[in-house]
Image (cartoon, rainbow, N blue to C red):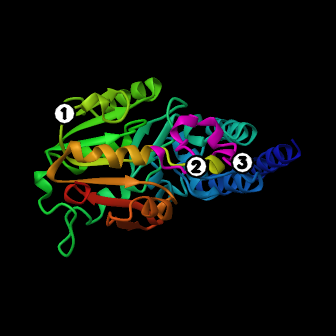
Amino acid sequence: MKLFAAASALFTTAFVLAAAEPAKPVTVSAIVRSVAACLRRARLVFAHGTTDPVAEAAFIVGETIGLHPDDVESRATAPVTAVQQKKIARLVERRIRTRKPAAYLLKRIYMLGVPFDIDERAIVPRSFLGEIFTDETFAGEEFSLIPDEGSVRNVLDLCTGSGCLAILAAMRFPAAKIDAVELSKGAFELAKQNVARHRLAKRVRVLNGDLFVPVKGKRYDLIITNPPYVDDRGMKGLPPECRHEPAMAFDGGADGLSIVHRIIGEAPKHLTEDGGLLCEIGRGREVLERAYPDLEFLWLETEDSSGEVFWLDARQLR
């Protein structure tokens, strides 16, 4: 309570100071700095689409005043009205008091600049797979997982959650049809909502069920998945922010890889001859490699990760 009171007081003071000169408009940059200071003082956890207090402050301010996160910096000198300031203040107070992720408070999240609806029915999406979709991994001149990108006609997204990766895959592979499978009924409904938002219902089919069960007998050129991969110890140590999210979206069993084991075991029956599996597993690389000594995992790196995403092609899995 003392920490909350201190953060609230700091936030109030920052706004009073910002508005102390009525002839001088309060700018976007001033509000972002004030919000970031409050979030930093409150010692919150940032792992839900924002990575630090400044990024989250920009997200909160931008959403409140109608700016895309990518445009906040370029509009740094734009004025923020008194009404908008009060709305921002209420959001920050709730963020600090409840420790609920900002994305849940705003009902919005962005991946690669693409907006998605989000609420407590699904985990707040954050995945390294999205970054892989945008680099040269699939169509590089020197290296490519898929020699002919245009040959990707059918993609399966397992544990789709809010449907973000399925939608990004549809954007990445314009000739492909996407099946997105989700076990949670609530997340399934949210994924359908996001597909409709992006007008992709003709290409992205959302299915409610357990992993490969809803697509029995079907094969895919590409299977992508960001399944639950937190082990028992990690589940006990989840920060307050993560405890607002569905536990089933984190819980990967004793070693964190119970669902990954199932996916690896069943994927061969659902891949085309030249297909492949792209899977994010967090920090379970050593455990996974010990479990499958005969598989040659290709570990992919992103700007913020190393050894957390693997690729296996259909030939290796047979």
Q: Mark 2 or mark 3: which comes first in sequence?
A: 3
The residue indicated by pointer 3 is 22
Q: Are marks 2 and 1 in contact (CB under 8 Å)?
A: no
- Residue 286, above or below 220: below
**First to last magenta residue range:** 235-258
Q: Mark 2 or mark 1: which comes first in sequence?
A: 1
The residue indicated by pointer 2 is 231
Q: Secondary structure at mark 2?
A: loop
Left/right placement of residue 33 relative to residue 252 reads right
Q: Secondary structure at mark 3?
A: loop
Q: Mark 1 or mark 3: which comes first in sequence?
A: 3
What is the spatial separation of the Cα atoms under label 2 and label 1, in whole angstroms? 31 Å
Q: Are marks 2 and 3 in contact (CB under 8 Å)?
A: no
Q: Amino acid at mark 2?
A: Asp
* Residue occupying the point 72% across, 36% down: 98
* Residue occupying the point 55% across, 43% down: 253
Residue reaching furthest to the right: 2
What is the spatial separation of the Cα atoms under label 2 and label 3, in whole angstroms? 54 Å
> Measured from the top left, where is residue 136 in percent x and y?
25, 66
Q: Quadrant of residue 184?
A: top left
* Residue occupying the point 49% across, 65% down: 286
Q: Amino acid at mark 1?
A: Gly
Left/right placement of residue 265 relative to residue 99 reads left
Choose mark 2 or mark 3, whichever is in front.
2
Label 1 CA crowd tier, 10 Å (few <14, some 14–19, many 20+): few
What is the spatial separation of the Cα atoms under label 1 and label 3, in whole angstroms? 68 Å
- Residue 305, above or below 263: below
Q: Is residue 237 magenta?
A: yes
* Residue 189 in sight: yes
Q: Amino acid at mark 3?
A: Pro
Magenta residues, dominant SS class:
loop
